Each structure stands twice: as structure tokens, then as C-alpha cells.
Amino acid sequence: MYPSQGLNDMTAKQQRFVTEYLIDLNATQAAIRAGYSPKTAQQQGSRLLTNAVVKQAIAAQHSRQLEVADVRIEDVLRDVMTIAHTDLHTLTEQSGIPARWSDKLKALELLMKHLGLAAPETHQHVHQHVHFTPEQFERMSDDQLDRAETAYKTLATLEREVATDEARRASFGARSKDVLA
């Protein structure tokens, strides 16, 4: 970056990427929504996240979002503790919608991600299993990032399969109790 280069020097696509990235913190999807080719979106998203001007714009816009939302880390942590200690039955009664563990975890994950308490999606899923620093991610080659994403997809698929199996077992257990009663 040249010393005179600033936030106003971003292209329209880069500015759109910043806005789109802050929606779900998914660089690939943000690149696609910003107008980059779906074929190269993953590489473009990764490249854009390492661009100093784009990083600065993301940080500035993220700070504004936090101010507007008037959310403090202490508030989120208090709510996380409340949710973590509230059983699913009570959550279902309070919301009127059947609560599942995956719902609770996803809500917490999104809140924490948007507040900067967790790494963005491209890092977080790997971070759940392997501890990389942001600097390590920045130094990774596209091939290494692709391999990490493949590993995540494999683990996410396995996680869904296990959750489905657990739900089936729980459902079977509930039906068995009804039959025995």
C-alpha cells in the first residue's frame, strides 16, 4: 500500500466486498455477492482479507456496527452464560419454538463471531480443531487454505451425521419409554 492510499482508494467491488463480508463474515460468499466470479471467489476473498485498505475498512465498519448495536462483551457473555445454563425445554417454552442444541450453539457462534469474540468463518471452523493464529492464516498458500477448508467440510459433515444419529437415538429412546409406559 502506498502512503497516500486510503479508504477512498478502494474500488467499488472492494467497497461492496467490505459491506457483504460484514453480513456473515464469509469471504467467499462476500466476494460472489460483490461481483467476483464464483470460480475465483475463494481466492479473491482470501486476497481481499489480506489487503491492508480492505482490512482497515472492515475494522472501521465493524466498529461502527458495534457502536450502533450498543452491545458490550459483558452483556454477550452474560447472555451466553444464561443460554448455556438454560435447558432446552425452558427455551422451547419461552420461545414457543422447539429448541435444539444446534440452535443454541449456532446463535452463540454467530453472536460471538460478530462481536469479534471468535475468528471469522474461514478461520473459526478450523480453529475449533486446530489452533492457528490470524498471522498463520495470512501466510498460508491458497493450497493450504483449500486443504484446511476441505478438512473443515469433512469435519462439519461428520458433525452433522453424529448429531442426526444422536437425534434418532433420542427419538427412539422417547418412543421406547412411551411404549413401556
Image: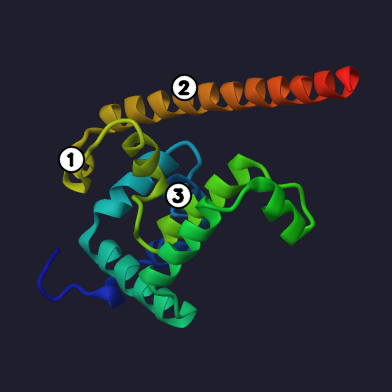
- At a point 87% along the width and 24% down the height, the residue shown is 178
For the question of whether residue 68 can be seen, the reply is: yes
Mark 1 vs mark 3, CA separation in Å? 18 Å
- What whole-number distance in Å separates the C-alpha atoms at marks 1 and 2? 22 Å
Residue 52 versus residue 127 in the image, above or below = below
> Taking 137 as reference, is 162 left or right?
right
How many marks can you see?
Answer: 3
Please name whichever residue, 168 or 132, is drawn nearer the observer in this view of the structure: 168
Comes first in the chain, label 1 or label 3: 3
**What's the amino acid at mark 2?**
Thr
Circle 3: residue type: Asn
Q: Is residue 21 visible?
A: no
Q: Quadrant of the N terminus?
A: bottom left
The Cα–Cα distance between marks 2 and 3, rounded to whole angstroms, is 18 Å
Q: What's the residue at 18%, 40% (across, down)?
A: 136
For mark 2, what is the residue? 154
**Residue ID for mark 3:** 26
Residue in view at x 18 percent, y 72 percent: 5
Horizontal and vertical percent position of residue 60: 31, 74
Percent of width and height locating residue 84? 51, 51
Label number found at residue 136: 1
SS of the residue at dot 1?
helix
Which quarter of the picture shows residue 176?
top right
Q: Earlier in the sequence, mark 1 or mark 2?
A: 1
What residue type is disc 1 on? Gln
Q: Callout 3: helix, strand or loop?
A: loop
**Tags 1 and 2 touching, CB below 8 Å:** no
Residue 86: x and y in percent read 58, 53
The residue depicted at 53 percent of the width and 52 percent of the height is 85
When asked about the image quadrant of residue 78, the answer is bottom left
